[in-house]
Amino acid sequence: MTHPFSMSQEIELNASPEQVWDAIATGPGVDSWFMGHTELGTAVGGPANLTMMGQTEQATITAYEPGTRLVCRSAEAPDGQFMATEYLIEGRGGGTTVLRVVQSGMLGDDWENEFEALQAGWPIYVETLKQYLTHFTGRAPSVTTVVRPGAGGPDAIWKTVTESLGVTPDVSEGDGVRLPDGSAGVVFYANLPVNLGVRTDEGLYRFIHSGTDRGDALVLGHQNFAGRDEQSTWEAWTAERFS
């Protein structure tokens, strides 16, 4: 049976409402902090599609109020499942903006695990948005997406990932790391055993464990803002360490 759900997050961003709108309501903007490639229309009824690993999830814009509000809703499955995401933008004094993100809809039979995954997964994307607007706003990235199913349980995965970054599994926000290519970075988000975010001078790098109930996959979602295509590099790194 389906089950209704709703969850929300709020974050204050050091950016103007116009900059926040560009980041959440344009395809290139979303590509700078989310996963895969997003196609967004500019009016109600337009597309809000996400393409990742060759597959496209289709959605539609149901509310479009430039600078203020955007709502996107997936198509309804035969059993009634769907998901809607609402972005609410409010400008504040001092050049800051508050963004509220509300997700709602209907989940499936495994709704408890699905809801838990959403709760654990979304905060790193919101924090990535903050990092983008603070350090790379207006710059287009080269996007890397790698999914490695069956990479292992959380302990094994994070031991390998953190060793590759030159830290231990008790890594925390603000810790210095070094990527496999030698680039220095800093941890901007740490919620092990779920996900880890790193920022370098060139980009934003996220390492995500899908959960044992979702195939023990390691997911990489990276943005390089220096124009370097790193897809093959990270595919090789993942294949070497998680054979």
Image: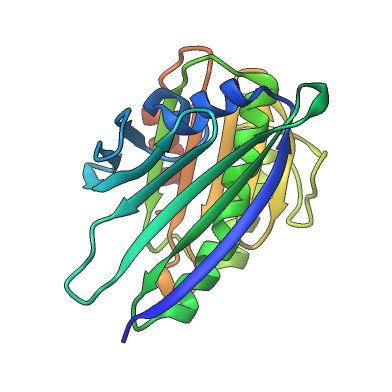
Residue at the image position 28 percent from the left and 43 percent from the top: 53
Left or right: 75 as drawn, with respect to 155: left
Q: Is residue 62 above or below residue 110?
A: above
Compared across the picture, whether 208 is left or right of 62 comes to right
Residue 156 in the image, given as x and y percentages of width and height: 58, 63
Q: How far across and down, in percent of the image, does residue 172 sit?
A: 80, 49
The residue located at (37%, 72%) in the rendering is: 106
The reply to whether residue 233 is visible in this rendering is: no
Give the position of the C terminus as an image quadrant.
bottom left
Q: Quadrant of residue 20?
A: top right
Q: Quadrant of the N terminus?
A: bottom left
Q: What count of labels does the image hold? A: 0
- Which sits in the foreground, 221 or 90? 90
Rendering quarter of residue 76: bottom left
Q: Residue furthest bottom?
A: 1
160 and 15: which is toward the camera: 15
Q: Quadrant of residue 54?
A: top left
Residue drawn at the location 42% of the way across and 46% of the way down:
71
- Along the line of sight, the residue nearer the viewer: 166 or 124: 124
In the image, residue 142 sits, relative to residue 205, either above or below, namely above
Is residue 113 shown left or right of residue 17?
A: left
Q: Tell me: 209 left or right of 97.
A: left
- Of all residues, the one furthest to the left in this rendering is 78
Coordinates of residue 181 in the picture (x, y in percent) = 58, 25
Which residue sits at x=68%, y=20%? 135
* Residue 216, horizontal then vertical, whole percent: 45, 66
Whether residue 186 appears in this view of the structure is yes
Q: Nearer the viewer, residue 115 or 174?
A: 115
How is the rendered protein coloured? rainbow
Compared with residue 170, is residue 233 higher up or lower down, i.e. above or below?
A: above
